[in-house]
Image: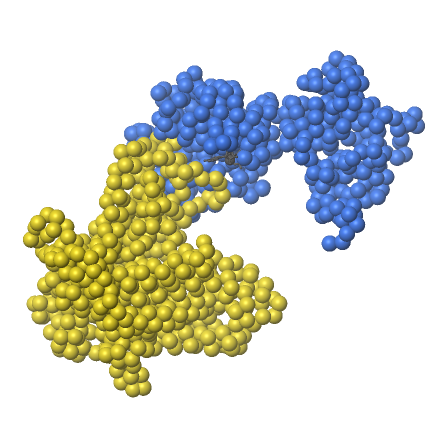
Amino acid sequence: MTLRQVPVLGHLIVQSQVAADLWRRDKGLGIGLLIVVALLVLFVAYPLLVVGAAPAVSDWVRGATTGRWRTTMGNTLFMALLSTLSSVTIGFLYAYAVTKVRIPGAAFFRLVPLLPLITPPFVSGLAFILLFGRRGLVTHQVLGLNTDIYGWHGLWLAQTVSFFPIAFLAISGVLRSINPNLERASQSLGAGGWTRFRTVVLPLATPGIAAASLLVAIAVLGDFGNPMLIAGRFRVLATEAYLQVSGWADLRMGAVLGLALLVPALVFFMLQRWLQGTSTARYVTVGGRGSRLEAEPAPPLVRWGLFAFCAFIAVFMLAKYVVILIGAFTPVWGVDFSFTLENFTRTLVRSGELWNSLRFAGLAALICAALSTVAAYLVVRIRIPFARELDLLALLPAAIPGTLLGIAYVLAFNTPPLALTGTGTIIVLSMVFMFLPVGYRICVATLQQLAPSIQESAADMGASGLRTFVDVILPLIATSFSAALVYCFVKAIGTLSAVIFLISHGTVVASASILNLAEQGYWGLAAALSTSLIFIAIAALAFARVAFGKRFALFDV
Amino acid sequence: MARTHAPRDGFTATDGGAHVELRGVSKRFGEALAVDDLTLDIEKGSFTTLLGPSGCGKTTTLRMLAGFFDPDEGDILVAGRSQKGIPPHRRNVSIVFQDYALFPHMTVRQNVGYGLKLRRLGRAEREDRVDRVLRMLGLQPYGGRHPHELSGGQQQRVALGRSIVMEPDVLLMDEPLSNLDAKLRVRVRAELKEIQRTLGITTVYVTHDQDEALSMSDRVAVLSDGRLQQVSDPWTLYHAPRNAFVADFVGHANFLPVQVERREGERTVVTVHGRSLVCHDPHGVGTSGAEAVAMIRPEWLEVVPAAGRDPQDDGSGRTFDGTVRTSTFLGSFARVWLDVDGLERPLVLDVSASSSTSLESGRPMTVRVPDGRPVVLAEAPSDVGAFGPDLPRRDAAQAVRATHGTTA
Ligand SMILES: Nc1ncnc2c1ncn2[C@@H]1O[C@H](COP(=O)(O)OP(=O)(O)OP(=O)(O)O)[C@@H](O)[C@H]1O
Ligand SMILES: [Mg+2]
């Protein structure tokens, strides 16, 4: 047995040889790799280590034995289970209706679930308060009820509506990848509609559905805005951690609670990666070329049943935005519904916060897209050392709840030489690394489509690695760069969970002040500010669409 | 629906299968007519092939037989019963897809047993029938594997097994061999034909590969643009094509514009550049004085050795003098393109590899047209390339350059 065959040591030896090789071959690439690795280590790995080491044993004991926090953990898992279940169920039905049954208006229904993905996540919470709250439009005005949406059921509703689009996107991808000829074959072998669904479609979609569930569960665990706005006394770990830090300045307890959130999220994250790998290896369609028949049209009852279902969901989703728009022009929600522009004139006073949001998100988007592109290029295209580890590190932030990331940044960048707390820089950095996984994934997907021969032919003509990248690859991935840019921007401009720990006087962003306004009952102002954010996000998308045309596709639906 | 047909005791000498009739079947997609008034009789137990170029409506016809959609006009009868309105899962018709459409989440056994399970056959009988099919196809060792763990040829056999285990009235196959490599294709072709013959299943086979069609079929139906061109056994199709399209699509052919002289029973005498040729006229298209086309297969032309040249032959007979433009060696024979004065296109002929004739470019060569071999057709195909059939690309490019006096 040689040293190379020892599990960890062998890997290290082989990888360092690859590193030496790369350095000899191309210094430019080597330096690029060093910078990417340094950034990822400094702003992803290091803060995690700091926050992991922050609590003392006594803090852990306190966390585990205090009844209140045990309840909070129970609540968190309960919500993760409940909201995931409902989101995935709705997401599956919706995806099935749109991709397989092709209900009337499918093109429209396909677009509706994309809205929550590009608008701030807490919009759901805010809208539901306006719709179903104590002074809610539906509950109070129309039905005359005195109900209270605050609590787990309100949170359930808001999270379901916020996160079912994630399930929808993932599952419609899975459904579309199922060869329609399989259904036709099963039909020809004697299977009726329900049997086809049960014996072919469902078993083939199951790994994808499981992976989608894990994605949703991670999002629910990390959700901060909705529980903050709508959960009332019902506490989950994300909000409790925030209260520990903001109310009691107890960073170590905040870290304990945040870490308690990180553990299940990480487990789900790894499981999801594993599931994705095995299911594609195994269920990838065999056989190759051949024309494909469209699936048979579903019976009218199923078709119209699903149509009604999708219509209901779509109306519900759009109502969210309509009510926020109305709220923005209403003086006192629930009391005075006359028309006013005052909310907007008063938000002008807060234009500094909007401007902060805009410039931080813009800067973060640029850095994030650049970093995504370079990292993806290195991992996909170049034989670099520790490629798998680098890939994992770039995707890891997807599993980190924003709350924990915020606390980690506060702890890690509080002292020289990296005393960044209180600056705009730290906010930008948190945005960059929070949304890196999505940008990185977009770029990886694009690069994997490019034939390696393109690069080789350029290298043939004597271009160095870096030159190849700039001359050949870069023009080709301009689209994925722009997608990463826009995606990071629309996400960053509405993000709340990490940023809320990092703002200070002068660096307050709009999303944070929306939360503040809503908590104090200034619904009109909160709605007006939200409306501004939504419009900025939509304008950014529209701009990208115009600038890049049809090639620009953020979501593959 | 009559499902109690084939015997249960084995897979030999069954009379599984049914007589199939297509009666004036048409299918349109929007404006385009994919299948145009197709009438075709498919005999019980026969192997019938639908042959034609891409987009001619083969798959569409097959899908109508499978029941994936109904014809817009006309009717399809299986064993005398109209199939109108019967959904695919109620028809005893089984289809093998071009991409096999194997269920990736099931093992080979589960794939093959899938249809039987849906028929609620007892477990013992089901296992028994699956076993027999796996044995017949040489798939027993792979029963527990998933499709992605099989080679292309094995996957193809599983797809076939999944269909024949159902003992269908009609077995449909849509280019089932096109995903296999060339060598395997030829082998599987023979196996497939053998299995079909043993089982006696009425089979409708779709392909655009003429070799496949000629070697496997009892009858071949040639389609073009949704219309039936000719139905016949492979020999007749090759030697007596009904029109230029069929002649051109099945095999290779020279088309010579000729003048019809006179008819002598089955024979027709035509002239081309002063030479008279005695042709075969199976469809009686030659009327005296009319313009027509003589179709000559490359292997029908005979090389006349320079030494043994008939002194009495003054060139006005059945021979053509020309110079070799180019040739390609194809193993057992070489294909030669011969420029002949007065002919617009080079003559294509196949020369046996054992012949000692020199095939170098520029060499003179004389060829003879045997009496009775050329087939008289009403007109030439519309789209034969400027250099005749199958001139190698490189030479075609050279020829273009030569004619246009340009360099690449
Ligand atoms: N679902 C459809 N919608 C519209 N047009 C169709 C559809 N299916 C087939 N066609 C058209 O009908 C014609 C016949 O198609 P078909 O698939 O039967 O051809 P084919 O003979 O099987 O060709 P190939 O050898 O390429 O498989 C084509 O012109 C095709 O474009
Ligand atoms: Mg076809």
Q: From where the camera sits, is residue B194 visible?
A: no
**Corner quadrant of residue B236:** top right
Q: Position of residue B343 (x, y in %)?
A: 80, 33
Q: Which residue is located at x 47 percent, y 77 percent?
A: A31
Q: Position of residue B127 (x, y in %)?
A: 34, 33
Furthest toward the right, the residue is B311
In this view, B9 is above or below A151:
above
Q: Nearer the viewer, residue A41 or A374?
A: A374
- Chain with blue colouring: B
**Corner quadrant of residue A292:** top left
Q: Nearer the viewer, residue A287 or A342?
A: A342
Q: Which residue is located at x 44 percent, y 61 percent?
A: A480
Whether residue A353 sits left or right of residue B109 in the image: it is left
Furthest toward the top, the residue is B265
Whether residue B272 sits left or right of residue B376 in the image: it is right
In this view, A340 is above or below A65:
above
Q: Which residue is located at x 28 percent, y 63 percent?
A: A532
Whether residue A78 sits left or right of residue B363 in the image: it is left
- Chain with yellow colouring: A
Q: Which residue is located at x 35 percent, y 65 percent?
A: A488
Q: From where the camera sits, is residue B41 visible?
A: yes
Q: Nearer the viewer, residue A208 or A423?
A: A423
Q: Position of residue A3 (x, y in %)?
A: 42, 73
Q: Position of residue A331 (x, y in %)?
A: 17, 61
**Corner quadrant of residue A236:** bottom left
In this view, B45 is above or below B103:
above
Q: Nearer the viewer, residue B322 or A234?
A: A234
